Image (cartoon, grey):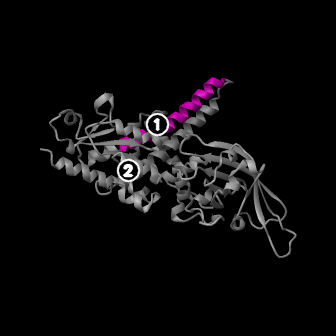
Amino acid sequence: MKKGYLSEFFTGVAVKKLSAVEANPARSNQHEFNGVTEVIQIFGRASGKLTFDAKFVYLSDGDDEPVLDTGFVTWYDAREKHAKRTEHRLYFPATTVSVLAAEGDLLVIGRKPDNTVLVVIAQGGSTISNQIQWLFGVSPADRSGFSVREELETEQDRLRFASRTILEQIGIVAEPTEENLLEKMLTKFEGRFPVTREFSSFARSVVGDIDAEGAPDEALMSWIEKEEILFRTMEKHLIADRLSAGFKDDVDNFISFSLSVQNRRKSRVGFALENHMEELFKRLKIRYQRSAPTERKSRPDFLFPGGKEYATQSFDSLLLTMLGVKSTCKDRWRQVLAEASRISPKHLLTLEPGITTDQTGEMEANHLKLVVPSPLHDTYTAEQQKWLYTISDFVALVQEKQAKIQ
């Protein structure tokens, strides 16, 4: 086990696409995974029936929250007494997760260091399915069997912002902290979270000197990564304090507190991303306006060179640019299409890894250009990467346009 890598949470993973027999709960009350010879690498050769406590997760792009259940898996050799032949099988009972499974869905079986098992089923052909395959660095085999990985300590397995975000979706919290900075943050921010702009500025100061002008993609990811770590450090402390104070059997108060924690986590990343992009534009001396009003009371996250030029009908629309900012896309990318009618194509920055080719194809058909920091480009297909913008690409485009403005 190596801290900061996938091996901290998994001793091995096996991946395959579900067949019709495996996915159809009407066929049996028990589910048998076919082609399990490779899984011996993870569970070893069975001697008798081995039962593992298991957590089951179902994920799809259409749901913000996963479907969860608990149960067990059983690993055994159906021909244990046969001298010349083994036939290992892996069973699990019907669960609320298994009834959602369909042919072609991605199945991931992960054995954890505490000897429990995580079973993840992701909707076939979905963005979350792409992300999970990228996270574990393994794709389903063309044949019916499993693809397996045991060594999870390569550079690909190092946990960074994107990989930690995906792990959270399958119920694994990987939260690196910087306890050495906790006291400094508590003093500076008087023991509570400041506004996001102030916290983003602090995170950049901790990162220190960085070539934002020469390498804006790497700068943005460094700032976002650092802010995430510092946020979790401070959040962990503040939540612990609140929990230790207790809620005196006040269930409503506890639920309200829990919701406030969840909502802060969801909204903060988007604001942080905007804050750091704004800093990049300032350092690169790019003219912009944040949340400038356009038609129908819409307010694009960034408008270049600004709202005044946009509102001036005589200003050449080809010299206008807009950038929407969404840490994750899902179907929310369509919201950007209704903003800034004078501008086409529109641009959208996201930290979402591995969006499906169907989705990016639809974006392209709607004249939306996707901007993704270059460190995340390898989560997309080679064909998609030809179409994606890096932050450097987007900056160059805006600078070229602004050079033409008198």
Confirm whether the magenta stretch covers residue 208.
no
SS class, disc 1: helix
Q: Nearer the viewer, residue 223 or 46?
A: 46
Name the spot of residue 392 as percent of width and height, x first: 31, 55
Give the residue at x 26% y 53%.
Answer: 396
For the C terminus, give its image quadrant.
Answer: top left
Q: Is residue 189 visible?
A: yes
Name the spot of residue 361 as percent of width and height, x first: 41, 51
Q: Residue furthest left?
A: 406
Position of residue 257 in the picture relative to residue 318 (left or right): right
The crowding category of the residue bearing disc 2, from other C-alpha atoms within 10 Å (few below 14, some 14 to 19, many at least 20), is many
Above/below status of 126 relative to 75 = above
Which region of the structure is painted magenta?
Answer: 250-276
Query: Mark 1, mark 2: which one is toward the viewer?
Result: 1
Above/below status of 356 relative to 306 = below
Give the residue at x 52% y 43%.
Answer: 232
Give the residue at x 54% y 53%.
Answer: 125
The disc at residue 220 is 2
Name the spot of residue 375 as percent of width and height, x first: 42, 57
Which amino acid, by three-letter code, is at mark 2? Leu
* Residue hosting label 1: 267
Position of residue 137 in the picture relative to residue 378 (left or right): right
Confirm whether the magenta stretch covers residue 264.
yes
Which amino acid, by three-letter code, is at mark 1? Ser
Name the spot of residue 54 as percent of width and height, x first: 72, 50
For the N terminus, give its image quadrant.
Answer: bottom right
Q: Is residue 72 visible?
A: no
Q: Nearer the viewer, residue 26 or 41?
A: 26
